[in-house]
Image: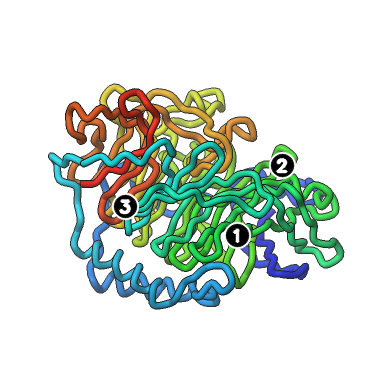
Amino acid sequence: MSGSLTSGSGGGRKTVQHGGHGGRRVNQAGREFPREDTKNSRRRLTGPRAGTTIRRGVGDLANYHSQQEHALHGLDLRQAHIIDLSVEDAVKSIVLLAFLILLDVSVAGAQVYTVTDLGPMAPTAINNLGQVVGNRNGSAFLWSKGQAARNLGTLFEGTSTYAASINDLGVVTGTAVGPGLVISPDSSIPNEACSDLTQPFVWTQTNGVQGLGTVGVPPYEIMSPYWCEIQFYGTGINAFGQVVGYTTEYEDNYQWAFSWTSTAGMTLFGSSFPPSVANAVSDGGEAVGQTGVLLGQANSWRDGVDTVLGTFGDLDYSSSANAINDVGQAAGWSTTIALNDCDWNLATCPMRAVLWTPTGEISDLGTLPGDTLSAASGINVAGQVIGASGKTLVGQGWGGNGGSGFGGDGGSVAVIGRPFIWSASTGMQDLNTLIGAGSGWVLNSVSGINASGQIVGSGTWKGQSHGFLLTP
């Protein structure tokens, strides 16, 4: 099934066509569509190549941002009623990122980071102003320099919140549980009010936590009695307030990616089978993620068109794009052998952290010495990549941005091991070797990096689980 299902504030139905996907596809009646030849529609791959990083000049940046204008057309840049955002502020954010690219920011070979203790929260993201969001005991928190971590609260009569991303205007998104409305895309089926809906949210200083509700999933006649049970997870937000994420799996097969803006409401996109997830979105409106479980490949979506970013092999390999920066570089992982060579079990397949360039090249970022697995979780505008290198792959539950691979049992995947930073000039480095000796810290995982090279993650300090901020 391909296409896009859009809801605004009412029950009208709109359809926007998307590009095709490989693999088994079914229509709403459950009939299988013929397999498409996706080889001819994929970007040309030249990898694996080690250490490929794109640098752009002033002319390239001007062309790039001109190309983004169409993607941003039609968005309410003020994000009325929910997001306090102006065109001027958003443009300033993009100009800041472009300026940093021109400075050609890089990581020094002997870089040592200072460690800031963020307390007993698990950080998930950091913006370019150094604001950090994270979670503890079912509550979302915001940390700013010089201030105590702030509990963002819940929906009215809600039970929990999970912060996943923050933009440079301090707007937070993630997932909240509480009362919410499911908008029906079919005018013959009414909207559904739910008392306990898992839905994306946005938080602002002015309005607090605001639930975005969800949209009814197809086939409408069959699924409408269960719409309140379909969970929607917010994973990313850009400078214009566009939120992306994905639904949980349902009927053991179906899963959609979604995008939300204050003007267009919520739009389902991707393919329902293979399932689709959106993990992040750039300021240019390009979302990245994965289409498929087990046989899923990394994808990007923009202007109603999806592009398979590719793997180290063919469609019998798996990959996921987990992050994207504002020059079009994406980072994530790819298996290094075909899934049929590891009994179709992603947990036993070796995978490597990868970098995709805007021109379609894929680079193997390697592993730390002695490890067999690695996966990238973040990338900044300078092309610095963060992630984990280790020997164990786990399912971290739905709502994360690791790409899927364990069906509905384990959710998104994560490599357990040592956190790393990679750059074209230094290669992959163990972050534990880049902090002061005797600090009392053991860094376990990393989740976000900003344009200044600040990194957030989780570790232990003197044996206690704490969040940390690394500053170069």
Say whether disc 2 or disc 1 marks the residue closer to the N-terminus: 1
Which disc is residue 250 wearing? Answer: 2
Kindly report which numbered mark, 3 or 1, lies closer to the viewer in this rendering.
3
Q: Residue at x 55, y 26 (%)?
A: 345
**Which percent across, then down, holds residue 42?**
48, 53
Label 3 secondary element: loop
Give the left or right position of residue 214, taking residue 292 as reference: right
Q: Nearer the viewer, residue 319 or 81?
A: 81
Q: Is residue 113 above or below residue 218?
A: above
- At mark 1, the secondary structure is strand
Q: Is residue 51 visible?
A: yes
Name the amino acid, label 3.
Answer: Lys
Residue position marked by numbered label 1 in the rendering = 210
Q: What's the distance in space between the residues labelled 2 and 1, CA to CA?
A: 25 Å
Q: Residue at x 60, y 72 (%)?
A: 263
| Residue 187 position within the rendered picture, expressed as x and y whole percent measured from the top left | 82, 67
Label 3 – label 2 distance at C-alpha: 41 Å
Could you tell me residue 375's position as x and y percent? 39, 37
Q: Are marks 3 and 2 in contact (CB under 8 Å)?
A: no
> Which element is circle 2 on?
loop
Query: In the rendered image, which residue does mark 3 sit on?
Result: 145
Residue displayed at 51% across by 66% down? 206
Relative to 42, say whether 368 is above or below. Answer: above
- Between circles 3 and 2, the one closer to the viewer is 3
